[in-house]
Image (spheres, rainbow, N blue to C red):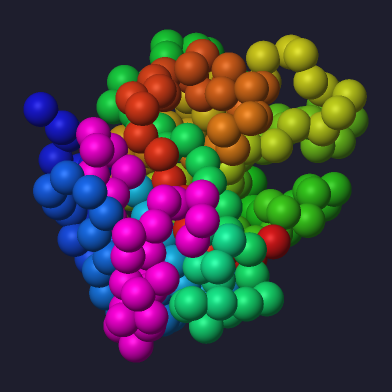
Amino acid sequence: MLDRRILLHLATWLGQWPAGPGLHVVRSWRRARPAWDGRPRPAVAVSAGGSTVLSVPPQRIEAVRALVRGRPLEEWLPALPAAVGTPELTSHRGVFRWCTDPAPLPDVGEWLPPEMPGAPPWLGLFDRDVLVVRDADGAYLAGVGIKRHDAYGHELAVGTSPAARGRGLARRLVAQAARRVLAEGAIPIYVHGPGNHASARVAEAAGFPDRGWTSFGVFPH
């Protein structure tokens, strides 16, 4: 049985969950508003067990339904940005993972403001503390930010500086951040590209199994 938090997250984030077999295009006001970082996410989808829910802005639902009708994903996904009114954006695909039991790896990071000196620019997108590992001189080595999509689903984003790779920092940070998300009452989520094997290894080691779920959508570059 699925954890109640992932069900609540998907129902809230997408506008409907669960759904029957096949592709279901649904409307959600969330697709017409800025996401956690102030940028648009005009199309978001999750696939699990032969069922896919594709969430789009209410005013674009008929155009998207016409686009996908009777066509395989590979044919219509490149045209999805234009169909939701944002041709300047790009469609993306990912492996969608979530976790209820993070790996018992030792904590390694400290929670600091995202504007901390020396932090990479991507951490500056977050509006709350980020989890960071620094060396003895205070230089950034690795970090995790939390994308709080809604009250029930918080997605983790991790990055390691090239000089610090291979030390196992990313997996320890992800597990540590996942424990915090669970303590806050939400479900931790981890999404990576299908061909990103390094990120997949981090997810597995941190306690995020590959359940065969996937995601896709239209996001900023």
Q: Residue at x 40, y 33 (%)?
A: 97
At x 33%, y 25%, the residue is 211
| Viewer can see residue 41 | no
Compared with residue 112, is residue 31 higher up or lower down, i.e. above or below? below
The reply, left or right, for residue 179 in relation to residue 24 is: right
Q: If the image is split into quadrants, where does the N terminus sit? A: top left
Q: Measuring from the top left, give residue 200's x and y in whole percent.
A: 56, 23
Pinpoint residue 164: horizontal percent, then vertical percent.
Answer: 82, 22
How many marks the image carries: the answer is: 0
Q: Quadrant of residue 207?
A: top left
To which quarter of the image does residue 39 belong? bottom right
Q: Please give the name of the residue rendered at 72% of the width and 54% of the height, measured from the top-left corner.
A: 122
Would you say residue 118 sits in the magenta stretch? no
The location of residue 101, given as percent across then percent down, is 31, 20
Q: Which residues are magenta?
A: 47-76
Q: Quadrant of the C terminus?
A: bottom right
Residue 15 in view here: yes
- Outermost residue to the front: 70
| Above or below 3: residue 201 | above
Q: Is the residue 96 above or below the residue 19 in the image?
A: above
Question: Residue 185's image quarter?
Answer: top left
Q: Is residue 100 left or right of residue 179?
A: left
In reply to whether residue 57 is colored magenta, the answer given is yes
Q: Residue furthest bottom?
A: 59
- Give 190 or 144, whichever is nearer the viewer: 190
Is 55 above or below relative to 123?
below
- Image coordinates for residue 163, horizontal then vertical, percent: 89, 24
Question: 119 and 90: which one is in front?
Answer: 90
Name the residue rendered at 24%, 38% in the picture.
50
